[in-house]
Image (cartoon, grey):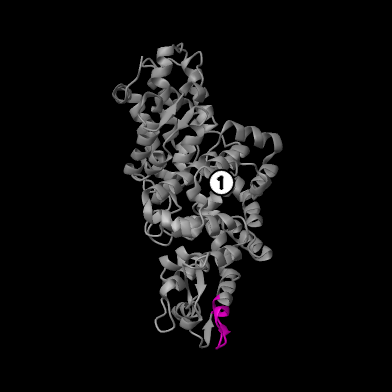
Amino acid sequence: MTVTRRTFLGAAGACGALITLGHRWIGLASAGAASGWTEPVAETDPAIHVLNRVTWGVRPQDIEQIRSIGIDAYIDGQLQPESIPDPVVDAFVGARRILTMPPGELHQAASDQYETVLNTQLSARLFRAVYSERQLYERMVEFWTDHFNIPIGDLLAEKIIDDREVVRRHALGTFRDLLFASAQSAAMLYYLDNASSTAEHPNENYAREIMELHTLGVEGGYSETDVTEVARALTGWTVNDSVVSGFYFDSNIHDQDEKTILGTTLPAGRGIEDGLQVIDLLATHPATARFISFKLCRRFVADQPPESLVNSTAEVFVATGGDIRAIMRHILTSAEFMSASGQKFRRPFDFLVAALRVLSPGLQIQDYTGLVYATEPMGQIPFFWGPPNGYPDVAGAWISTNGLLHRWNIALDLVQAGNGYLEGAALDITVVVPPETTVGELIDSAAQHILERPLPEDERAMLGSYVTRSGDLDQAVTAELYFERLPGLIGLLIVSPYFQWI
């Protein structure tokens, strides 16, 4: 029997137990935004917890690897992405020259074929997240993309160059190098108007954001006078299309008078040295160490990270000169991190990637662009956040009835891909969760594959009432029952709070 969307939703709607379960799960997800998600099941296996945070979604081979080499060795390996072969991603990128074009060619391509260039970049963002073996690296790329946010719409070529030459090049390097690269990025200089900042008319947009959002933080101890002085120091930092990197220092429009920034005097008569000193000052400032440490702990540990971890991470930042690998090793091996299971809510793009990874054994995707745009109603298309602060990183920004319903829709589309409900994708459900003898065994097998944990008995029973109207967990699984109910069962597990809170 071929199940249709109508029969699937009709069956679901007729099942009172399933409606109760759905309401309970939405309630649990929403409650987590205010009070923190408390798992109603046994504590997560430490290895699974690490995989949930380090990767975009747990696959059987990830579990096999981390159990084989141990948690510490797995983390150390992920912190050395250059040593991890990534042939699938290499082949994908190699087949799309747009992603590696020199700046001049890329600008021309973006002018001639805007949509093609844009969709190639969006597809690559999704593909790398789903299939890269360098999972932590890709998660760090996402973090720094948000931290140094530049919307892609009006700066397509510049943003693609920024992605590969700033964020990707320095994602696990030093914060100082990353900050310098960002400050000389044509995309950033255009986006925050520093490209047109002159001695006669200094523009304060970038000066303000480099302190408030990129380094010190809003409570970092700078003043409005500091903003004005930083803007003066960075006059002349502009863009010249004839230069390969795009960055150009124009001494003719630089303010050469004396400046005082955060108590440090910059003598008169200098040029680019003003900006270099300011950026170095900001990169090494104690407030920067704390601000960046807080944001990393918030992303990888909890929306309200433990103060003890933020403090110790800031100490590592200072001691290592902002070595991002050392900072991340400290966070990921800390006791605070290991005890933070279930405290992060997957953002929309994270949710989509995690679902694709968990279905990947049987999922074939032809249209990655279409899947990327599926995040639009959930509010997180990569590279499209307009303000300079990046996509929100706390659960409260993403949890709403409307937002959760859009997640249900994409999950149900994904699991019904085998029946033609998702254009550009196909799913062999038998590869994801093979047939089992009884309904109870089928539910347990699906929960183990999707969630890597057992379900509480009451919710296991409710899912039994969805799979079979009698709710008999000992009922034999026929071929008809398996193909009719398994897609919906998997979809429900994907939208459960156990999958969304990690």
Visible in this render: residue 311? yes
Q: Position of residue 445 (x, y in %)?
A: 52, 23
Q: Residue at x 59, y 72 (%)?
A: 280
Query: Which quadrant of the figure has residue 94?
Result: top right
Segment tinted magenta in the rendering: 262-275
Q: From the viewer's side, name the closer residue of 219 and 104.
A: 104
Left or right: 110 as drawn, with respect to 48: left
Q: Quadrant of the N terminus?
A: top left
Query: Which quadrant of the figure has residue 482?
Result: top left
Q: Residue at x 53, y 44 (%)?
A: 93
User: In the image, is residue 190 above or below residue 122?
Assistant: below
> Where is mark 1, residue-wise?
340
| Residue 271 among magenta residues | yes
Q: Position of residue 408 (x, y in %)?
A: 37, 35
Left or right: 200 as drawn, with respect to 69: left
Q: Residue at x 51, y 72 (%)?
A: 248
Q: From the viewer's side, name the closer residue of 445 and 87.
A: 87
| Residue 391 among magenta residues | no
Q: Position of residue 233 (x, y in %)?
A: 50, 79
User: In the image, is residue 289 above or below residue 24?
Assistant: below
Q: What SS does tag 1 mark?
A: loop
Q: From the viewer's side, name the closer residue of 298 and 145.
A: 145
Amino acid type of disc 1? Ala
Q: Residues within 10 Å of mark 1 (few under 14, many from 20)?
A: some
Q: Position of residue 48 (x, y in %)?
A: 59, 37
